[in-house]
Amino acid sequence: MAAPAAGSPSVTASAAEVAPIAATFNVVADFTVWGQTVYVVGSIPELGSWNPAAAVPLTTSGRAWPNWYGNVALPANTYIEFQYIVKGADGSVLRWEKGYQQNRTTITPPTGTYVTHDTFGGY
């Protein structure tokens, strides 16, 4: 296929070329102790495809604790399921969310950002 001639209308981007959205996950986990880390894991590759070893780590600090937060680029306009988990210093999963009968779900927006404000369920 030849490139469009100068001055031609631009080619519309395919769905695969749509820019990702910036996602921020915020969760309160007030039971965590030193050496533990909260992660978000979910149904899409960007959230580890339910593999805890590939989950996205969240961070906190003395001033922010018990609030954990982290950023990840997610595909736009996409249905996802996710949960928060807690891992120990050795990387072992100590706890999955249990307070919900189902996984958390959302559809990411077509553009812009996605932000959560959650509380870790089931501790």
Image: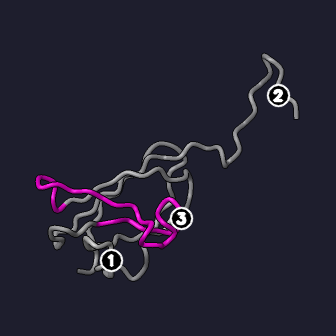
Name the residue located 15 percent from the left edge and 59 percent from the top edge.
65
First-in-chain label (2 vs 3)? 2
The image position of residue 94, as x and y in percent, is: 29, 79
- In the picture of the structure, the residue carrying the numbered disc 1 is 92
Whether 99 is drawn above or below 62: the answer is below
Give yes or no for residue 63 being in the magenta stretch: yes
Q: Is residue 53 toward the left or the right of residue 68 in the image?
A: right
Residue range corresponding to the magenta coloring:
38-66
- In the picture of the structure, the residue carrying the numbered disc 2 is 3
Residue type highlighted by circle 3 = Ile
Asked if disc 2 and disc 1 are in contact, CB closer than 8 Å, the reply is no
Name the residue located 25 percent from the left edge and 59 percent from the top edge.
68
Q: Secondary structure at mark 1?
A: loop
Along the viewing direction, whichever of 28 and 85 lies nearer the viewer:
85
Q: Quadrant of the C terminus?
A: bottom left
First-in-chain label (1 vs 3)? 3
Between marks 1 and 3 in the image, the one whose residue lies nearer the viewer: 1
Residue type highlighted by circle 1 = Ser
Using the numbered discs, state the Cα–Cα distance from disc 1 to disc 3 in whole angstroms.
21 Å
- In the picture of the structure, the residue carrying the numbered disc 3 is 44
Crowding at mark 3 (Cα within 10 Å: few <14, some 14-19, many 20+): some
Along the viewing direction, whichever of 28 and 36 lies nearer the viewer:
36
Using the numbered discs, state the Cα–Cα distance from disc 2 to disc 1 in whole angstroms.
51 Å
